[in-house]
Image (cartoon, rainbow, N blue to C red):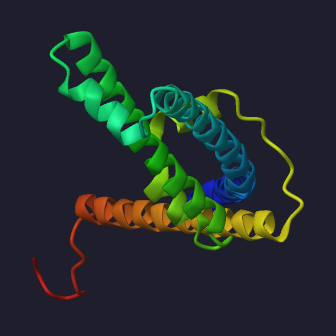
Amino acid sequence: MKKIFRYPLRMVDGLLDRILAVIGVVGLAQFPQFFNQYLQRLGGHLEEARLTIARYINAAESLDLSLEAYVAEHLASENKIFTSSGQVMTDIVQRLHHLEESFLALKQAGPFNRWWIFLREMERPIVHETWQNFTPGIPTTIEGFYYGLAGLLVVWGLYQGLKTLMLSLGRKTASFFRPPRTKPGIPV
């Protein structure tokens, strides 16, 4: 009876194994493409922050002030409107510095540690924007090949581990319901 089920199960296992391998390869090979699209968006946010700060610098210079003095005047004001605009300017300057640091770190990251730097530096709203407009591509670089290979190994390893776990649990469950074996000639 067991032999009847072995062939279809092996066929399903082989098919599932190959499908998951393709998903792993294609899925993780998309990382370089996603990374580049994320980097472009991050660069856009960085340029917008620079343009905004440049406008504030021009406004400060027209009053013969540095940006720092201009912001300090706003923050020290008794008027809530000016105080809040001073806080907005402070936030934009801090964001600009953070975006510059993130962009530089991602730009300098090598192909093998890029994923780690990305996880450390990513900005969730920009990741979300990138994902909404992500265009998959066929990786034709060595980096894409390595990420595809990593995807194959990770998914295949997870599948084999899960399969081994399921088989082990199945054997334990089956042995639980099996009557104990007795030696011939020894009464139970």
Q: Is residue 119 above or below residue 57?
A: below
* Residue drawn at the location 62% of the way across and 68% of the way down: 109
Q: Horizontally, is 151 left or right of 163 in the view?
A: right
Residue at the extreme front: 64
Horizontal side of residue 93 vs 129, given as left or right: left
Residue at the far right: name it. Answer: 140
Please name whichever residue, 77 or 30, is drawn nearer the observer in this view of the structure: 77
Residue placed at 65% from the left, 43% from the top?
A: 43
Report x, y in % for residue 93.
42, 40
Nearer to the camera, 32 or 150: 32
**What residue is rendered at 86% in x and 65% in y?**
141
x and y, in percent, of residue 75 in the image: 23, 27
Q: Is residue 52 left or right of residue 25?
A: left
* Residue 71 visible in this rendered orientation of the protein: yes
Residue 179 location in percent, x, y?
23, 65
Determine whether, in the image, residue 113 is placed left or right of residue 124.
right
**Splitting the image into 4 quarters, where does residue 14 fall?**
bottom right
Up/down of 151 relative to 84, above or below: below
On the image, the x and y values in percent for residue 180 come to 21, 72
Q: Which residue is drawn at 40% across and 65% down?
A: 165
Q: Residue furthest left?
A: 188
**Is any part of residue 159 visible from this angle?**
no
